[in-house]
Image (cartoon, helix red, strand yellow):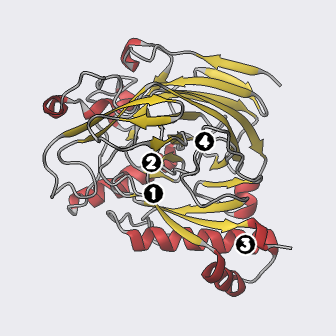
Amino acid sequence: MSTFRIELDRHLPLSKQPNKGHNRWHPGIPPIQVVKSGDVVVMDTLDAFDCQIGPDTQASELRQVDLGRVHPLTGPIYVEGAEPGDILAVDVLNVEASSFAYTVNIPGFGFLRDSFREPFIVRWHIEDNVATSPDLPKVHIHGNPFMGVMGTSPSSDLLKVINEREEKLKSQGGAVEVPSEHGAVPTGHLSSEAIRTIAPHETGGNVDIKQLTKGTTVYLPVYVSGALFSAGDAHFAQGDNECCGTAIEMAATLTVRLRVLKGEASRTGQRDISFSRDILNQMGPNDHCLSSLHGPFYATTGICVDRETGVNYSENLTSSTKNALWNMINYIHQKYGYSNLQAYCLCSVAVDFHVSQLPDIPNVLVSAILPLDIFE
């Protein structure tokens, strides 16, 4: 197997670094790298706001931040042999943090956007896997770095479905970011129909799941030839919720192994992102576990799109939870052979639900996490 390196200048906006990445999802965006199943990719990623926020940024300047540039992603990466109906398994081998990071409250964004209308910034210094800031004195946040965005490209058909349901939701007053050419990378005709990176979808994307750290494997349904994998929006740490709209945001270097699981999405019916860890959480001397998940687990997810009708709801935690639960019931049935009713009862006694993120309109995301050490 081979290792590929994708380098970026972490201080230069994506638009100034051609053929390195994109900030919209569209199957027509050409890949920047071709790899084989099992290859390792080491990829630099920019911060979520595309180099617009630095150590000297003041809160008053946040009103001028161009949200059209969110999120700069490194990719797409074409994985040979990946076809619709497959699963792309992404083994997270490492997430190397930067020394500077930030958390911001942007007016008009976040779960309590109607209550907190003033801009605010926390400028973090990261050293020895600990983040500190004079903007939040007497606080030490231990790191567990992960990527907020990991995903594959939608097919042309799925892209059309997503755009139609989100346009309908917007017309009904729902909170949603529809396609916009402003700030888009790449520019041109694709940007008029390419979906924004703000919300997660069936392809993964901006899932903001804090458990996707080193040692975790992410499973993404493949919708196009080559999968077209991309990643970005690195977080040094985050709570299960990301309520103000940002975590501890940073540039980073991600190392992943990409593996094609032939026919697995078709065989199991998987249509959303899932993730697992097969080994005990191995923590180094400077690591601090931000989760109670010390052992092996498998997790499913849900967003607020009705499984039967395809209707997209706005920020509906009940819908997202139901979808995560149904995905877990299906996994337990497929993997262990239990009936759906048996799986339902097992979920009631063993599965934990996590509100992974609240602000990524319209699709809040819930994770259902099953500990694997309960099985003989």
Q: Residue furthest front?
A: 138
Q: Which residue is mark 2?
A: 238
Give the mark nearer the N terminus: 2 vs 3.
Answer: 2
Classify mark 3: residues with Cα within 10 Å, few (<14), some (14-19) or many (20+). many
Mark 1 secondary-structure assignment: loop
Q: Cα distance, mark 3 to mark 1?
A: 24 Å
> In x, y percent, where is residue 284?
68, 39
Is the Cβ of the residue at disc 4 closer than 8 Å to that at disc 3? no
Mark 4 secondary-structure assignment: loop
Picture layout, residue 130 above or below residue 43: below
In this view, the mark in front (3 or 1): 1
The quarter holding residue 184 reads top left
In-image side of 71 versus 226 (left or right): left
Q: Amino acid at mark 4?
A: Asp
Give the mark nearer the N terminus: 1 vs 4.
Answer: 1
Q: Amino acid at mark 1?
A: Asp
Give the mark nearer the N terminus: 4 vs 2.
Answer: 2
Q: Amino acid at mark 3?
A: Ile
Q: Which residue is mark 4?
A: 287
Picture layout, residue 63 above or below residue 167: above
Query: Which mark, residue 332?
Result: 3
Instruction: Name the one closer to the observer, 222 or 147.
Output: 147
Q: Quadrant of the N terminus?
A: top right
Determine the residue positioned at 23% across, 58% down.
112
Q: Which residue is mark 1?
A: 240
In-image side of 205 versus 59 (left or right): right
Classify mark 2: residues with Cα within 10 Å, few (<14), some (14-19) or many (20+). many
Is the Cβ of the residue at disc 2 closer than 8 Å to that at disc 1? yes
> In x, y percent, where is residue 316?
36, 68
Give the mark nearer the N terminus: 3 vs 1.
Answer: 1
Mark 3 secondary-structure assignment: helix
Q: Amino acid at mark 2?
A: Gln
